[in-house]
Amino acid sequence: MAEISVQPPQSATWQVHLDRSMWVGGVRGLMLQALHPLAMLGVWQNSGFQEDPFGRLRRTADFVGRVTFGSPQEADEIGRRVRGIHKALRIHDPETGRTHRVDDPELLLWVHCAEVSSYLEVARRGGLGLSDRQADRYLREQRRSATYVGLHLDDVPGSCAEMAAYFERMRPALRVTPEAASTVRFLMWPRLPHELRMLAPGKPAYFPFGALCYYTLPGWARQMYGALPEVPQATVTAALKAFRLGLNALPETVHDRAFMPATRQMLRASRERLGAAGYDVSKGLKGLTDPRRWPQAA
């Protein structure tokens, strides 16, 4: 039987990527990525991130959506597009005078790990009930996503233990460059673009969204940045749970307005394919996190 979507509703990826805490995880991932000096230079020199940070977040959401809910053909197409863009871009390191490729496997791996670890950790901390075994399964499944940007399956951490070991190895290479400091300051106090203003009710009034993302960073990353005074982590967890609860209560049709039109079209096509395959899509894609909505043979 042909694959309906790259990751099926039965996957751990489906549970994580349909959770609305992904917005916090996405910004946290950007903050974490910025600690790698060369990766940060790559973003600084090759994108309009400073003018349109949410544009980058939405493009990332489109990629994640297509390699999760899209058809294998859609995932292959966006993978070719992303690899083609990365292949043509270069990074100039003013400290060494060297030029580096954006598609250097080490840089691609850092970006992948910062992203998927952030999605997973934020969702679990926010209240998504994933067991340790399911969390490991999520990271194994994300190895496939990494292949779309050009990484080899076996080079990507596939468990929580492997991911923790990877970050431990990487920490000596990380530092706060002026570009990283500027980026994290900007992300802490973003002005929501028009398309995302409907998300405002989901964030606690006393805890600005950007600060919430910052406080979910690992303690060692916050210590490196030193951008905000420390607060009790129990307060951070409570704020994250409130944010997640508010966003998860939004109807799917309302929440999906935050995505680019092409992303919304892809999600509609996914619902149609799944409905034709016998899944109950009356509650949208998020409803398919409930096994009772799967075909009996699934």
Image: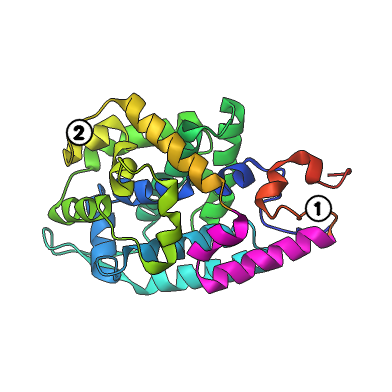
Residue 293 against residue 192 in the figure, above or below: above
Q: Residue at x 60, y 54 (%)?
A: 251
What residue range appears in magenta?
251-276
- List x then y, in percent, for residue 8: 71, 50
Q: Mark 1 = which residue?
A: 279
Q: Residue furthest left?
A: 95
> Is 275 one of the magenta-colored residues?
yes
In the rendered structure, which amino acid carries the disc numbered 2?
Gln
Residue 281 quadrant: bottom right
Disc 1 crowd, CA 10 A, few/some/many (<14, 14-19, 20+): many
Q: How many marks?
A: 2
Among the two numbered marks 1 and 2 on one chain, the one whose residue lies closer to the N terminus: 2
Q: Viewed as shown, does residue 125 lie left or right of 208?
A: right
Residue 149 against residue 155 in the figure, above or below: below
Query: Disc 1 or disc 2, which is closer to the eye?
Result: 1
Q: Residue 172's mark?
A: none
Q: Nearer the viewer, residue 39 or 255?
A: 255
